[in-house]
């Protein structure tokens, strides 16, 4: 079949990394794939490096639901030829949900893959208005996301929880400890991924060293990885303002993966200000012998126990929560406590498992869709 995937980002972050896995599965099933994105970016290069024969099409007119660019929705939504001619359309993330009414009206076969967890008034309303009606399949990246969708009217029979794919590892060995103890936060810098909060928690735990002393005079070091979307620069500005006079904290910009920085760090911190949909970072960290800590909610709360992470309940005192978890994390890392064996984690993230689930979703999506009901006056 011809598959057209609409994706609102051309980056190398969580949903895009899982998209590469989805495309690999679709190609292995014999389908052809075209990916439509709103702007240039690294995806085409990522596809080449992964050996994926997928076409990347940049369409600035793609209708993406994003608060920082809400004016884009004033433009009429259209189905470009690659979408109109596709046998199945994939809406990759809720950001493409504006296409649902038009796809239903045109009786196109499609499925939606949700990588968000937005239990806000606006997020709940979006699900109730656009996802709850109809019978098209919906994939969720975690049980937490699936539960949120179900609470807002999406029938459980339409939902499929699909985990990301990771190549099996044979051994998990902790890297050499650094002096000072080095912690990392990895993710989009958007004011919600915990960069600012983790920095504040560490500063509250240990008094700052004078700026003229070397970082080695400190008991810890924090590396911040990630970058903002256009329109989210204020989140990075807030981080930079906080850390500008603290030599223990360094902003590094984008990181390709946790594996790419594993040699520099001892642990990763995952403390978003709101529950996240999935926990890619803890799994990536475990694969290279790095332990993670985070809140015990959302998707990360599901995976942290599986990979030996430190999970703490979220309370109304987040600084205390984060500080407590970091102290526990440091003790665990310094004690060289063993991480779970690959035999217990590998089976949860296999390509075979995702292929089975994806085949079922495609079969349901390709079934003749029902036309969007239009009430007569």
Image: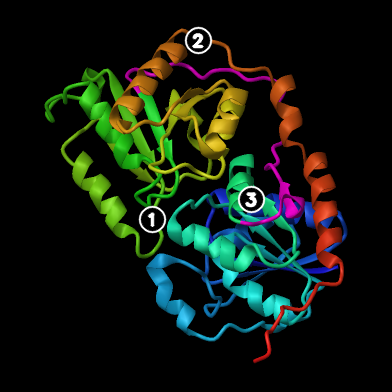
Q: Residue at x 65, y 49 (%)?
A: 140
- Inter-mark Cα distance, 3 to 2: 41 Å
Residue toward you, 94 or 233: 94
Q: Which mark is residue 336?
A: 2
**Horizontal side, residue 104 vs residue 308: left or right:** right
Specify the principal SS of the magenta part.
loop
Q: Which residue is mark 1?
A: 228
Q: Residue at x 72, y 21 (%)?
A: 344
Q: Which residue is mark 3?
A: 150
Q: Is residue 40 above or below residue 209?
A: below
- Inter-mark Cα distance, 2 to 1: 34 Å
Packing grade of label 1 (10 A; few <14, some 14-19, many >=20) is some
Q: Which residues are magenta?
A: 153-181
Tell me if label 2 and label 1 are in contact, CB under 8 Å: no
Residue 189 in the image: x percent, y percent? 38, 49
Q: Quadrant of residue 152?
A: bottom right
Q: Quadrant of residue 83?
A: bottom right
């Amino acid at each position: 079949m011809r598959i057209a995937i609409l994706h609102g980002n051309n980056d190398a972050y969580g949903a895009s990394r899982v998209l590469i896995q989805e495309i690999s599965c679709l190609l292995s099933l014999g389908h052809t794939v075209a990916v439509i994105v709103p702007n240039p970016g690294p995806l085409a290069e990522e596809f080449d490096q992964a050996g994926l024969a997928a076409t990347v099409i940049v369409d600035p007119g793609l209708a993406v639901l994003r608060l920082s660019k809400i004016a884009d929705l004033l433009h009429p939504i259209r189905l470009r030829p690659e979408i109109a001619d596709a046998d199945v359309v994939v809406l990759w993330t809720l950001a493409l949900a504006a296409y649902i009414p038009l796809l239903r009206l045109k009786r196109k076969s499609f499925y939606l893959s949700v990588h968000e967890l937005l239990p806000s008034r606006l997020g709940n309303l979006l699900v109730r208005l656009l996802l709850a009606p109809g019978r098209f399949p919906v994939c969720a990246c975690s049980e937490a996301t699936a539960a949120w969708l179900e609470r807002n009217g999406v029938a459980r029979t339409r939902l499929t929880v699909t985990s990301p794919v990771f190549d099996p590892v044979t051994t998990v060995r902790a890297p050499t400890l650094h002096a000072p103890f080095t912690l990392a936060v990895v993710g989009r810098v958007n004011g919600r991924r915990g960069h600012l909060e983790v920095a504040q928690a560490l500063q509250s735990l240990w008094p700052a060293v004078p700026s003229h002393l070397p970082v080695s005079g400190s008991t810890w070091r924090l590396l911040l990885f990630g970058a903002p979307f256009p329109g989210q620069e204020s989140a990075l500005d807030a981080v930079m303002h906080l850390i500008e006079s603290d030599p223990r904290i360094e902003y590094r910009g984008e990181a390709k993966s946790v594996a790419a920085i594993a040699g520099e760090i001892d642990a990763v911190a995952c403390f978003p200000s709101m529950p996240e949909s999935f926990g890619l970072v803890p799994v990536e960290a475990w694969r290279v012998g790095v332990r993670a800590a985070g809140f015990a909610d959302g998707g990360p709360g599901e995976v942290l126990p599986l990979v030996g992470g430190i999970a703490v309940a979220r309370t109304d005192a987040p600084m205390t929560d984060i500080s407590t978890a970091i102290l526990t994390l440091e003790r665990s890392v310094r004690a060289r406590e063993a991480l779970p064996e690959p035999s217990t984690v590998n089976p949860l993230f296999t390509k075979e498992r995702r292929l089975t689930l994806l085949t079922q979703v495609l079969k349901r999506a390709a079934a003749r869709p029902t036309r969007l009901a239009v009430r007569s006056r």
